[in-house]
Image: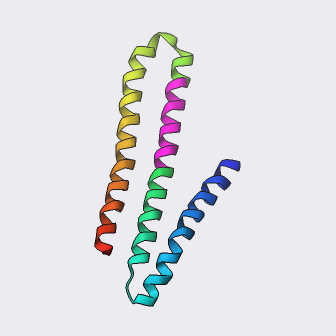
Amino acid sequence: MKNITLMLTVLLASVGAQAQETAQAAVAGNNYGLLAIGAAVAISIAVLGGTLAQGKAASAALEGISRNPSATDKMFTPMILSLALIESLVILAFLIAFLVIPGMK
């Protein structure tokens, strides 16, 4: 519960930091601030999902290794590959959110 509270606090703080841009954008009559908030929320969700998936993958691999230490070599490579693929999805979400920002200018 403590971790969820921390994650929500960080998420809300990042959205609050973008709120000033939203207020200025509303005065100017454009929706650039909303794009910034959308990008921030997209990155936050991607990072949250990636973190949970990496934790679950590492936990399952370590549990399997602890139950059968002779299978370490067979589990290590797929675990590293899955962690790299999960991280690549988070980086892809960051890239997509970052590509939305040039549309704001």
Q: Residue furthest right?
A: 2
Position of residue 32 measured from the top left corner of the image (x, y, whole percent): 38, 77
Position of residue 28 measured from the top left corner of the image (x, y, whole percent): 41, 88
Indicate the colouring scheme. rainbow
Tell me where residue 102 sits by quadrant. Answer: bottom left
Q: Is residue 1 visible?
A: no
Magenta segment = 49-62
Q: What residue appears at the point 47 percent right and 64 percent down from the top-left corner? A: 41
Check residue 55 for magenta coloring: yes
Q: What residue appears at the point 54 percent right and 68 percent down from the top-left corner? A: 17
Against 65, residue 11 (above or below) is below
Position of residue 105 measured from the top left corner of the image (x, y, whole percent): 30, 75
Nearest the viewer among 105 and 91 is 105
What predominant SS class does the magenta segment belong to?
A: helix
Q: What residue appears at the point 51 percent right and 51 percent down from the top-left corner? A: 48
Nearest the viewer among 69 and 55 is 55
Against 25, residue 48 (above or below) is above
